[in-house]
Amino acid sequence: MARRKKIYEGKAKILYEGPEPGTIVQYFKDDATAFNAEKKDVIDGKGVLNNRLSEFFMTGLTQIGIPNHFIRRLNMREQLVRNCEIIPLEVIVRNYAAGSMSKRLGIAEGTQLPRPIVEYCFKDDALGDPLVTEEHIAAFGWASQQDMDDILSLALRVNDFLSGVMLAVGIRLVDFKIEIGRVFEGDYQRLVVADEISPDSCRLWDIKTGQKLDKDVFRRDLGSLTDAYSEVARRLGVLPASNVTKPTLIN
Ligand code: TMP
Ligand code: ASP
């Protein structure tokens, strides 16, 4: 069998050329990194969980009409997605203060924000993904005013969807990051939610106990990352109650 062409390897995923034009295969690795890859480890089963969880969230977005890149899951670690041109921004939505916002503004982690706050970071590992304003985005031409209106609306719709889905299983969506891609259709472009939505890119706290069920478990050495992600998957009905390491994933 001909080897697939690797297009890009990131910290947590590898992208391969897809079987049809305009498609990409996203392979989820077990690698975990934090603090711009200063901290690294291989976490058995993380890729399988994130593949399933991202499928679950993207499929949910499709069901309520929020455009995204997901086409279908191919196997335990791979999914087929639409090829898109990623806008070089990390779009962060925060409902409660945590992480870099708490540090930057001196607000205690867990403080509810008066309304969801959207932030933009310039996607550049060498610079450590610095926070930027809409002024930078417009002046450097990373996105147009129309794009920014669409990005804001997508980000807030994703926030409403994810907050509700999580609340229903006793989890608080503290914050999350998404990436947005451009899909070209003839002379038109459409913006879609791309990359992944998983506990790698969200902060998820158990509502009753405050237990962290996201990548902060790895960043802050709080225990087993796969146990945390498996708990999210189990509550969402993505995994049966048994363990992820056993090949018992629901189809
Ligand atoms: P922050 O508080 O570190 O800025 O993170 C905000 C949210 O963005 C949090 O849910 C984790 C997510 N995130 C990523 O997905 N990738 C990153 O590189 C960083 C720094 C944060
Ligand atoms: N994703 C970033 C890294 O790999 C940062 C983070 O998620 O904390 O290093």
Image: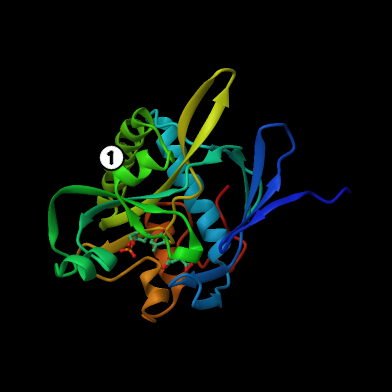
Question: Which quarter of the frame holds ligand 1?
Answer: bottom left
Q: Secondary structure at mark 1?
A: helix
Percent x, y for residue 189? Answer: 50, 25
Residue at image position (20%, 62%) is 97
With respect to residue 27, does 159 lie above or below?
above
* Disc 1: which residue: 156
Nearer to us in this view, 89 or 176: 89
Q: Is residue 5 left or right of residue 24?
A: right
- Name the residue at the front extreme: 139
Q: Is residue 70 left or right of residue 7?
A: left
Nearer to us in this view, 251 or 21: 21
Percent x, y for residue 46? Answer: 53, 65
Q: Is residue 209 visible?
A: no
With respect to residue 26, does 47 lie above or below?
below
Residue at image position (45%, 62%) is 241
Mark 1 Cα shell of 10 Å, populated few (<14), some (14-19), many (≥20): some
Residue at image position (37%, 54%) is 121
Residue kind at label 1, given as amino acid type = Leu
Nearer to us in this view, 20 or 73: 20
Q: Is residue 108 visible?
A: yes
Nearer to us in this view, 72 or 239: 72
Count of numbered tags: 1
